[in-house]
Amino acid sequence: MRGPPKYVRCLLPIWGDRYVRQFLDVGLPTWLAEGNLPALARTLPTNFVLLTTREDEGVIQRHPMFERLKTLCSVVVHHIDHLITNFGHSTTITLAYAEAVRSVGPQMLDTCFFFLVSDYIVADRSFSNVLKQMMSGCSGVQVGNFQVVQEDATPWLSAKRDNVSGVISFSSRELMGWGLSHLHPATVANIVNDPSNHNDHTNRLFWRVDDLTLIGRFYLMHMICIRPERTDFVIGSSCDYSFIPEMCPSDNVAIIDDSDEYLVVEMQPRAHEAAMLRAGPQTIARLARTLSKWTTARHRKNADTTVVFHAGEISSNLPDAEEEASRFIASVRKRLGQPSPFRDHPYWLGAIASFKEAKGLRLTRREMRYVIGLEHPDFSRGHIRAWLSAAVHFGLLGAGLKLRPWHPRWPDHELVLESISSSLQNKDERRLFVADRPTVFTTSMPDDGRRNFRAQRNIFMRQSPDAFGAAHGTFDACLIEMEESDMPSGDELIDRIAPLMKDGATVIVSVYNRRKKSNAIDFAKMMGAESAKLLRPAVRSSKFYFVRSPKLQWRSFDVATRMARFARRRPIVGLPLLALAGLPLALCILVSNRFSSVIKDQTPVAVVSSFLMVMHIGSNANLDIRADSSDRLDQNSRRLRDRLGDDKTTASNPDVWFTPDLASIVGETRSSADAATSPEALS
């Protein structure tokens, strides 16, 4: 056992309007109950570290409840814009937590880090009871919770708010009594002795003891507080997989097993995880199969502890329920395979591959397989299966920018490649790639942000136009890969991108036809109409193209796609079948590709496989478009402007909104936080 800690540091990663509002209006008021954050501040010097975006910081800082928090303890803001992508929420949270812990340096060994989550509703005295465990010498505390329906929780919590202070305070039994009547459907589905339905991918199980009592067995537990035992920890999986074994190798860890001591409920929309719910009881065999895919040794050890949730006195039926739960868990354990490693966990490898691709960082061959879907974390330890999938894919269809002539998308790919080839041949040009998901071009040309920069369209559109002021006139070429559904907002996207381009720069917009055969012919008409929106004032000249597809090509593409999906789902049968059918199918596609044609500057009345538009940006883009864009902000940017009110600090200094990744391209000094996203730091 260790001596008592000297400091408390509360870490909260939060971004996005929905989560920020929910936290400020509902979550934070429960954290400010006397036995929670105020109790921590009274016991030890306490810092509250807000891990958020530049956009959300101002809103949070101005809120009355956050102002109240700042009277209790010191508040530090750490920007995490460089860690946010359009997916991988848990990846961002894990990397943000790790950055915040490492920023403390050697002092982390004397610091209790509270890892907070924005949608947690906390009963009074929960945080202070966690700190008691840490003061007694523990290196870590783990806890379990359950979910309630957000739509029900919000009005109830609002009614509990103190009219003067704004604080929401209730005892654990009061919260538990309400929670039992508003359990989320995903929580109900995890009650083993209620056989009406079950969750197909659960990480926690419950047993109903009586009307006022539940018991829980958790594979996945939240590490609510950790005092690291080492400074050289490695993050090789998500925080609730790796933080405890990495930071507390002695396993000096306590689990709070009574809701009277600690109770948190998690608010989720009613439809959350609805796709995972199935009719009928949870079976041991099916549960063991899903748990074998991801659980570590620590996860399996967690399930040995019974956590009691009760709104009244503990029931006399508790021993019988615990015995039933222990038998069930023991039966599951007998069927489990080898535990997954907490370092280099398969799920984490896939998550980091997606993160690196979104940031334009170089990918390993295995990461490439993850990104394009040839290898999935669920079978990552089945190397033969992954190798076969990759061999068939790359061998038959080609890799990177060099696709085989019998690739189903070869005509579309060649048109894009030809349009951007002059830029690729010039090693001094800077190129911007805009796409929401991985593509052949974004995965084939990462150079860690030296010449090629990747921006996700959704995140790019959410930023204020002033956010990229320091990057004006930076890029020589831009490739925008959009979906058909993105075209209605294409005019605003061009207005955002045009100021970033040099005089005479090329902007290419590529859209693939992903419609079904029944309405594929309407794609060309839709693109012909929507493309007019792209002709913004900054566009000096433009040309557009369609790739016309023979019926054979379209049908062959459909068959190839179906067979590829089947081969990935059932490789033992699908891969040999694909190998047998591959040659005649490739021949059909090759012939149809040769008969495809490019139609220029007119809309064909035929099935086309893709649309391409090439535009050249004029020298007036930096002057005209910024003024035009300021009146055409999207909904999030308008909300941002309204919330900033009369505060002109940010508006007068565009560099405040300048993301570290973009800063590195135009020669700005890369921040220490951004440096943590390098391939070396990711480990």
Image: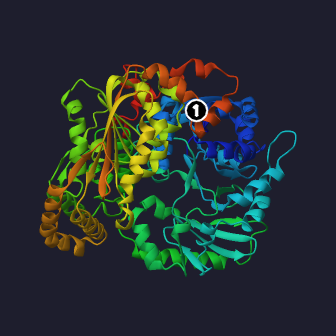
* Image vertical order of residue 547 relative to residue 58, above or below: below
On the image, numbered disc 1 is attached to which residue?
Answer: 55
Find numbered disc 1 in the image and state the secondary structure of the residue it sits on.
helix
In this image, 396 relative to 621: left or right?
left
Residue 143: quadrant of the picture = bottom right
Of 24 and 283, which appears nearest the observer?
A: 24
Q: Quadrant of residue 633?
A: top right
On-image quarter of the C terminus: top left
Q: Provide residue 546's location: percent of width, then percent of height.
A: 29, 48
Q: Residue furthest right?
A: 164
At which x and y percent is residue 553? Answer: 22, 62
Instruction: Report the amino acid beneath label 1.
Output: Glu
Q: Residues within 10 Å of mark 1 (few under 14, many from 20)?
A: many
Relative to 280, residue 539 above or below: above
Picture coordinates of residue 48 (x, y %)?
63, 34
Task: Name the residue at 33% across, 60% down.
Answer: 376
The part of the image, by quadrant, that contains residue 40 is top right
Residue at (37% x, 47% y) in the render: 354
Left or right: where 501 falls relative to 302: left
Residue placed most toward the observer, 191 or 428: 428
